[in-house]
Amino acid sequence: MCQCTTASAPVQLVKQGLFPCSPVYPALAINLEMLEFALTLFVHLTPNEAAWCDALTMFLSKRGHVFDAKDSFCQRFGTALHQYQVLI
């Protein structure tokens, strides 16, 4: 039997280089390299997750990726970034 079907969604995402925004039922996952970039950026700049998320949301929306609610991405990204920092 394939082990990938028995692994939870978060485990499968991490194996693919993505960090889930929720430990149980992730609706969004962030690329691990993007999280590492954000951590590095926030070391050299004043951390402003809201501005980062607004800029990224506008960038993604121009490419056809639209989020349901304005704060949806910001809240999920902030949670993922925090949990990633805790794990690192």
Image (tube, rainbow, N blue to C red):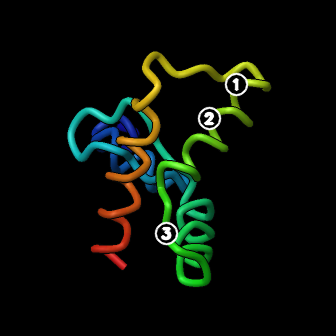
Cα separation, mark 3 vs mark 1, equals 23 Å
Cα separation, mark 2 vs mark 1, equals 6 Å
Mark sitting earlier along the chain (3/2): 3
Image coordinates for residue 60, horizontal then vertical, percent: 70, 32
In the rendered view, tell whether residue 11 sits above or below residue 27.
below
Q: On the image, numbered disc 2 is attached to which residue?
A: 57
Q: Which residue type does callout 1 highlight? A: Ser
| Residue at position x 33%, y 35% in the image | 26
Quarter-of-image position of residue 25: top left
Q: Nearer the viewer, residue 35 or 74?
A: 74
In the rendered view, tell whether residue 71 sits above or below residue 85.
above
Badge 2, how many Cα within 10 Å: few under 14, some, many 20+? Answer: many
Q: Between label 3 and label 2, give the one nearer the viewer.
A: 3
**Is residue 26 toward the left or the right of residue 47 in the image?**
left
Q: Nearer the viewer, residue 24 or 40?
A: 40
Q: Which mark is residue 61?
A: 1
**Is residue 63 toward the left or the right of residue 3 in the image?**
right
| Residue at position x 46%, y 36% in the image | 73
Image coordinates for residue 39, horizontal then vertical, percent: 52, 73
Q: Seen from this angle, which residue lies furthest bottom?
A: 44
In the rendered view, tell whether residue 51 sits above or below residue 26.
below
Do the residues bearing badges 2 and 1 touch, measured as CB atoms within 8 Å? Answer: yes
Do the residues bearing badges 3 and 2 touch, measured as CB atoms within 8 Å? Answer: no
> Where does the C terminus fall, quadrant-wise?
bottom left
